[in-house]
Image (cartoon, rainbow, N blue to C red):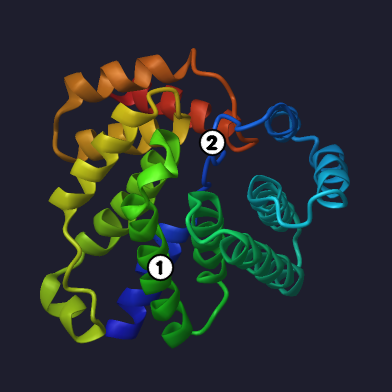
Amino acid sequence: MQRRFFLITLVSFFVLSFSSLTHAQSEAAKAIDSLIAQNKLDDAMKSIESGLSKNAKSVELLARKSRVTALRADGVSSEDEKVKLYEQAEKIASDAVAANPNEAEGYLRRAAAKGKLGLYKGILESRALVLDVRKDAKKVLELAPAGSYNKALASYILGRVHLKLGAKPKVMRIPLGLGWASKSKGRKLLKEAVSMAPNSIPFNLDYAKSLIDQDEKAEAKKVLEKIGSMPIFDPPDVKHKETAKKLLSEI
């Protein structure tokens, strides 16, 4: 029973997208982020590879390569190919961490890749991946120079983990080493993410959902209404906007 509960919880957590790492640290990164936002993944990868040929240890380029690789995995139908690409994304992100352990981008992209891998791994591996995701996200929050957006993304990731796991009885989670999660901590972390990155569509959407769950519909409505005019940073943001519009119609 615990195995079934855990697998369902993992699937619920990992079916999400992680927004762009940062609103760009250089002109090259800005151009790549713009291509990704337009879903021009092949063009984005060409720009990334061109940059890496000149600087193979660029964290911002390695992080974006990991991100594009994961987005490509999202779009393929073969489960084996998805796993292969997510594993590549994880390795690339680990290369970014190795290139500079004091920069946040590598940790965040590794958390994203490991999160997606949790959908396709065995139950014990998936549990370990959840703990790895939490560890990488917490590391970002500890890094002084991480930047407000990266810290916002780390807070969002942790908030999602807390909300999804915290929705299940603690007595079921303790034997799995997951007793630390709580919905109240999750809501607080999502609120912090929104305050640090107010234009992030997924941050606002999930925060609004948490408000609806608390029956704070008036506040949730305010958040959802803002999403319609927010800029697109990731291809999945288009669908997120549709979801926000649907939720608004149901409040």
Report if residue 1 is visible in the image: no
Seen in the image, is 41 located left or right of residue 82?
Answer: right
Which numbered marker is on residue 22? 2
Residue, disc 1: 10
Instruction: Determine whether the residue tagged by mark 1 lies in a helix, strand or loop.
Output: helix
| For marks 1 and 2 on the same chain, the one whose residue lies earlier in the sequence | 1
Say which amino acid is labelled 1: Leu
- Image quarter for residue 89? bottom right
Residue nearer the viewer, 233 or 26: 26
Instruction: Determine whether the residue tagged by mark 2 lies in a helix, strand or loop.
Output: loop
Across and down, in percent, residue 110 comes to 54, 62
Q: Are marks 1 and 2 in contact (CB under 8 Å)?
A: no
Instruction: Quadrant for the C terminus, please.
Output: top left
- Image quarter for residue 237? top right
Across and down, in percent, residue 32 comes to 74, 34
Instruction: Quadrant for the N terminus, please.
Output: bottom left
Across and down, in percent, residue 140 comes to 39, 53
Q: Residue at x 60, y 31 (%)?
A: 24
Report if residue 75 is visible in the image: yes
Q: Residue at x 63, y 61 (%)?
A: 99
Q: Residue at x 37, y 28 (%)?
A: 247
In front: label 1 or label 2: 2
215 in relation to 108, above or below: above
Mark 1–mark 2 distance (CA, rounded to whole Å): 26 Å
